[in-house]
Amino acid sequence: MLEVKNISKSFNDNVVIKNFSLTIKDHEIVALVGKSGTGKTTFMRLINNLEKANKGSIAINDIVLCNTINDKIVYAKHKDTKKYHLQLGMVFQDYALFPNYDVLNNLLIAPLAQKIDTKENLTKKAKKILKDVELSNKINARIDTLSGGQQQRVAIARALMLNPAIICFDEPTSALDEETTNNISELIKKIAQDGTGVLIITHDKQFAKNTATRIINSNKFISKEN
Amino acid sequence: MNLFIDILPSLLNGLKTTLLLFIVVLIISIPLGFIVALIRIHAHKIITTIIQFYIFIMRGTPLLLQIMFIFFGLPYLGITLNRIPAALIAFILNYTAYYAEIFRGGILAIPKNQSEAIKVLGIGQIRGFLKIIMPQVFKIVLPSVGNEVINLVKDTSLIYIIGITEILRAGQTAVNTYATPIPFIFVGIFYLIITAFITLILNKIEKKI
Ligand SMILES: Nc1ncnc2c1ncn2[C@@H]1O[C@H](COP(=O)(O)OP(=O)(O)OP(=O)(O)O)[C@@H](O)[C@H]1O
Ligand SMILES: [Mg+2]
């Protein structure tokens, strides 16, 4: 379960998020929609610790990334943020796969670095996940030989290797055709069924309706009562 | 043929000096250039400005002038160096600047999302840099680094100005002694053999990464 409470974020004078809260439970799929420039990516980057909040608290399954005490925000120590990151998967809009590794090693590098399991077991697991995302035949392919949709699925598989409690997608369908979009939709639903909470940023209303259990508009980032 | 056998020992002697300078400069200035590039990207503004100034001087003035300054100029400031150390210092300072610029370009060419993915996946900064960022940087910079390596072979001839007998100077002495231009052709062939060898190695590395 992801818990974001009273979070605020500005870039200099530009207030992007003010006192916003959101909880995502296991199995839940939340779609974040809204106008361009309203802070959707910023919100996701806050959750992923790629941007620092000015105020508020963020935690996954009670592992705290940041907390606000007496109006002052405190971030977890570097060592503890590693534990937090273990709870979280992120699929970047442009995938951010590692071009100097093949598909299998893109999946293995993070869990091996974190010493989650033996290489043998992790390889087994990677093969199973690649089967789930229908990429068994691409296991040793170089990243630049894959299509956009295939890269997207490698990125999802890479995030799933860490068994995240929450997984984030930034515009997962912006580069995909209708059929591939539907496949990704099914895949995300399956991930949620297995117990993961999902946050998706999307401009595609149809995709949001088909996939999400809840839709939130980013115009709520700056609440009126504040 | 007789001529070739006669002058070979002195040419080989000169070649030794050329290769010594080449190898030492290469081994020191490539890693040093990489470190300078990293510092220039990540350090505070003051240090960055100092590095920028250093690179500006090194690239904006002839290497020949730099060699002469260190060997002939510094003694007037109380710093006297032997010929070989003076040559080495001048070359290392100069080539480090060029390599630093090449590596900086390579590092900046890596998309920001690579380091963000490393962070989000908990791979760790150092491991991520070594296993993910650096291989990509090397792939990008290899052609430019290769060019500079070949330039370095040819630039070593500049040290004749401070009286070091490298292969070109050895060749010139032979030309004067035997009153024939043939030794220059031999010298040219030696340079071609070295650059051909380097090109071969670079192609091998390029295929590997
Ligand atoms: N690193 C940054 N520095 C300064 N301002 C930023 C930064 N990142 C985002 N912003 C600003 O924050 C606001 C929200 O940007 P964000 O990218 O989160 O919007 P978005 O909802 O994801 O838009 P889109 O739908 O176009 O992707 C914008 O006004 C943007 O200019
Ligand atoms: Mg965005």
Image (cartoon, rainbow, N blue to C red):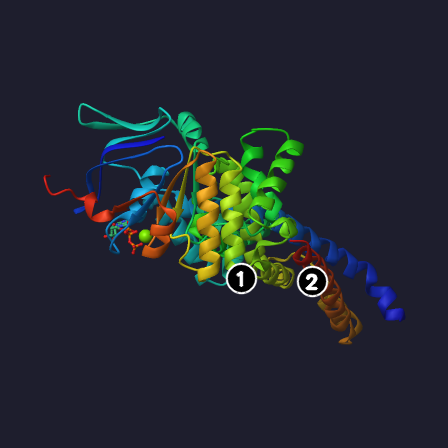
Tell me if residue B76 can be seen.
no
Q: Secondary structure at mark 2?
A: helix
Seen at 56% across and 29% down, the residue is A116
State the residue lying farthest toward the left.
A225
- The image shows residue B184, relative to residue B108, as above or below, that is below
Q: Which residue is mark 2?
A: B199
Residue A163 horizontal/vertical position (percent): 50, 33
Asked if marks 2 and 1 fall on the same chain, the answer is: yes
Quadrant in the rendering for residue B144: bottom right
Which residue type does callout 1 highlight?
Leu
State the residue lying farthest toward the right.
B2
Seen at 27% across and 27% down, the residue is A67
Q: Which mark is residue B64?
A: 1
Tell me if residue B18 can be seen.
yes
**Foreground of the two, A207 or A118:** A207
Callout 2: 10 Å neighbours few (<14), some, many (20+)? Answer: some
